Image (tube, rainbow, N blue to C red):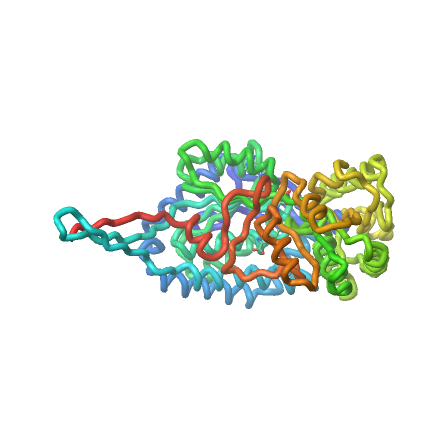
Amino acid sequence: MKEFKHFINGEYVSSASGKLFENRCPVDNSLIGKVHEAGEAEVDTAVRAAKAALKGPWGKMTQKQRSTMLHRIADRISERFDEFLDAECLDTGKPRSMASHIDIPRGAANFKEFADSMSHPTEGFRMDTPDGAGALNVGHRTPKGVIAVISPWNLPLLLMTFKVGPALACGNTVVVKPSEETPATATLLGEVMNECGVPPGVFNVVHGFGPDSAGAFLTTHPLVDAITFTGETRTGEVIMKAASVGLRNVSMECGGKNPGIVFADCDLEKAVEGTMRSAFVNCGQVCLGTERVYVERSIFDQFLARMKEEVAKLKLGRPEDPEANFGPLVSLEHRDKVKSYYDLALEEGATVEIGGGIPDMGAELNEGAWIEPTIWTGLADDARVVREEIFGPCCHIRPFDSEDEVIALANDTNYGLACAIWTENSARAIRVAEQMEVGLAWVNSWFLRDLRTSFGGAKHSGLGREGGVHGLEFYSETKNICIKL
Ligand code: NAD
Ligand code: 6OD
């Protein structure tokens, strides 16, 4: 049985309180191991270690030296690929075929990419002065300090390193609080940091829950200089309150209820393939995923029929099953939540086109967090199932008649993370994308990412942007040095 300890100041440490909680595999609900739960004392030690490390060898490194170290971390993740893959799949139950193409390679790429993209030209302005001599203004960037990284369970390594990579590239130190559901890859990353010679205190991990636990202790700690969070909007609101004490910066990547818009002039097969991925990959547990699909009426029946055919082909199975492309939800608790929306859909008058229940997976797997991929039609636009984020493998498909109508429908939500537009008419694609109230608009694609671009959500889906220069803004402090000539 595994034991997941905190990683503080370069060492694995137990909780002083002796408090541990269980970590279970959602495939069959078997016990993976026990996780140490951090109290205020361990969080305080981690934050102080991170603060001290800013003044140690890490703080004296040049940008180039840090960049070399981040490349080494990426290489080491790739060398230990199978260990990261095993750990991620055990925690989440996701298919190895998916994690080996998305989660682990992106975990490594997040260090490589940000190692390279975080050095930017310094701004400089020469100004006139009344005496005619002039002055020179030079923008100077310093690390922000200790960054608290609070991450979720759906893409644990990918989303945690999307923040740790740029934070370290800018010279900060971090204290990571991974989700209580998925402690493994963050813990393993500690070993990699030591193997790569990252100074103690630069990367720290504390385990635990949110309220009255590691998450709250970390986000309220006065020595934390900024907080970067990925998770539910409601949790983000609580964290923002904590960050208001001391006016700490926050970056918030939160939930979504993302629309897919399928015009009659799309390439139907591409639209079906893309919508299938955006609704069902990772068992629908992707913040960018499509839970509302709007299809132009003339192709509605054809599109729906093709989607149902493809859903019927999804193969549920263990992560290691080479045929399986669909795993369980992350936990029984989350399965209960998703299932409650399946029940609500019936109460709200949905037609269940396919799925809608809990599958019989056989004696070995029936204790796991399995749920059927599901498509509904026929719900009203104000149904809760159409308005609230479910974060499961399901979508509602509804016909529309005009471009203006679908733009209004797609934007009629408190969320504003992403959308996917399917059309072969590029003028229309641009026109519609420009009117979408979202942070990310995909045209004839989904989840296609150049890490130099901005990432984040509008409305209740987030605050601020990360990625490329946007991350540089968040993870560094800019000082203007004005030199009188
Ligand atoms: P969550 O908000 O429940 O938890 C996220 C993290 O916050 C966990 O580590 C949790 O322990 C911690 N936390 C909870 N309460 C806290 C508190 N009071 N103080 C400090 N930390 C606290 O989210 P989740 O269930 O892990 O993830 C699913 C949600 O995340 C969905 O809403 C999804 O849309 C969102 N998400 C968004 C993005 C994005 O990039 N926009 C990416 C992935 C997931
Ligand atoms: O690709 C990324 O950088 C990213 N942050 C993806 C988020 C996925 C949400 O579940």
Name the residue at the left extreme: 131
Q: Determine whether, in the image, residue 462 is placed left or right of residue 287.
A: left
Q: Position of residue 479 (x, y in %)?
A: 31, 48
**Residue 206: in sight, yes or no?**
no
Which residue appears at 45% of the width and 43% of the height?
46
- Where's ligand 1: which quadrant? top right
Given residues 201 and 386, the one toward you in this image is 386
**Residue 140: in sight, yes or no?**
yes
In the rendered image of this protein, does residue 189 appear above or below residue 8?
Answer: below
In the rendered image of this protein, does residue 69 appear above or below residue 132?
Answer: below
In the rendered image of this protein, does residue 185 appear above or below residue 253?
Answer: below
Number of residue marks: 0
Q: Position of residue 104 (x, y in %)?
A: 60, 61
Given residues 349 and 118, the one toward you in this image is 349
In which quarter of the view is residue 335 placed?
top right
Given residues 390 and 59, the one toward you in this image is 390
Given residues 418 and 159, the one toward you in this image is 418
Which residue appears at 33% of the width and 60% of the height?
62
Which residue appears at 44% of the width and 38% of the height?
44
Which residue appears at 53% of the width and 40% of the height?
15
Q: Position of residue 8 (x, y in %)?
A: 46, 47
Q: Position of residue 318 (x, y in %)?
A: 76, 58
